[in-house]
Image (spheres, rainbow, N blue to C red):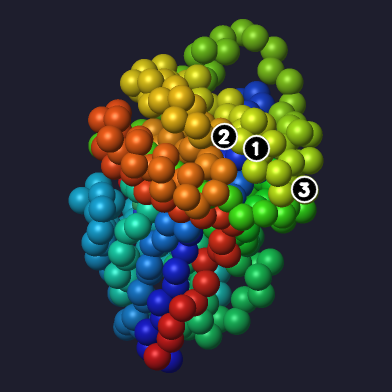
Amino acid sequence: MSVVVVRTPAKVNLALMVGPRRPDGFHDLACVYQAVSLFDDVRATLAPAGEFTVTVTGVGAAQVPVDASNLAIRAARLLAERTGVDAGVRFEIRKGIPVAGGMAGGSSDAAAALVACDALWNTGLDRSRLVELAAELGSDVPFCLVGGTAVGSGHGEVVTPALARGHYNWVFCLDTEGMSTPEVYAELDRMRGDLVVLPPRVPGPLMAALRSGDTEGVGRALANDLQPAALRRRPRLAGLLGAGVEYGAVGAIVSGSGPTCAFLARDADHAADLAARLSGSGLCASVRIATGPVPGARIVSEQ
Ligand SMILES: C[C@@](CO)(OP(=O)(O)O)[C@H](O)COP(=O)(O)OP(=O)(O)OC[C@H]1O[C@@H](n2ccc(N)nc2=O)[C@H](O)[C@@H]1O
Ligand SMILES: Nc1ncnc2c1ncn2[C@@H]1O[C@H](COP(=O)(O)OP(=O)(O)O)[C@@H](O)[C@H]1O
């Protein structure tokens, strides 16, 4: 086999509860991830040992680095180093996930790169070993391998599939300019000041609504501790969230560290209606409809 294509999803945090800042600079999290149907396609071609390259096309491609800092390259190099493989890879990434949008685009490419190179190089790592490597690459990377709906703990890298039913219809409003995740966490720390921050807990009502597939209950229980910090850095998002609620969204929330905003609809028709109204509002740059949950990074073709 010399070419592998992996399709890998975006995520939204249904809950993102942020605990105190730890000595290592990360924050303890209790979160609920859902993988949604905005995808990057990562095509990986076998290359001579030591050759690691990437090209990126699609929306926002110009903002993605194509040097060794690209998360797909970092993932491939990590896998090669840990398995002692003497091979290289050429990646072609087609972005469908908003860049720096709080939807784990780079993390998802890293997950895809692990899956692709494991197949291309015949390294044969089991899923749990791939998840361990994923955790070294970033807090969100293990979830992008697992997909579905899952609970995250630790700094987000410990992922346990959630007991969840239902099919959720989302509208995502994208901003023109991305936002830096570390800066949003730092803004939250400044806002909290000397407040005592309790250990984070996943909201019970959200888990109950997911267990019964209750869309309106899920919408009511969406929660994001990073949202006030994201809104402080991008105040215009507050108007957008308010408009979504006014147009009938059953839940409206900043996705992860933002600036993408996520709106939960009652069903597919409602999502189409909500998307049209949000798009017409002039309050956001562009709108995408997606559904969740979907699987994590998976091979869609190999030759
Ligand atoms: C906020 C979240 C929510 O799922 O996603 P995004 O909105 O970025 O997609 C994640 O916590 C982001 O995960 P990820 O983007 O993988 O971040 P990492 O590379 O691990 O960390 C980047 C930086 O974010 C901060 N960070 C990240 C995770 C965490 N639990 N606490 C933190 O304080 C740290 O400053 C860290 O150096
Ligand atoms: N393959 C990649 N795709 C997207 N962004 C990447 C990639 N590799 C590195 N990055 C960098 O990671 C940063 C965060 O982007 P991304 O992962 O899309 O957003 P977020 O952390 O908000 O979910 C961007 O500023 C980008 O420069």
Relative to 171, say whether 149 is above or below: below
What amino acid type is highlighted by mark number 3? Ser
Relative to 92, say whether 97 is above or below: above
Q: Which residue is mark 3?
A: 212
Q: Position of residue 5 (x, y in %)?
A: 40, 77
Q: Residues within 10 Å of mark 3 (few under 14, many from 20)?
A: some
* Label 1, label 3: how far apart the Cα atoms are: 11 Å
For mark 3, give the secondary structure: helix
Q: Position of residue 143 (x, y in %)?
A: 59, 54
The label number, if any, that marks residue 20 in the structure image = none
Relative to 22, say whether 111 is above or below: below
Tell whether label 1 touches label 2 (CB within 8 Å). yes
The residue at 25%/65% (across/down) is 55
The label number, if any, that marks residue 216 in the structure image = 1
Nearer-N-terminus badge (2/1): 1
Relative to 166, say whether 79 is above or below: below
- Of residues 5 and 215, which is closer to you in this image? 215
The residue at 58%/29% (across/down) is 224
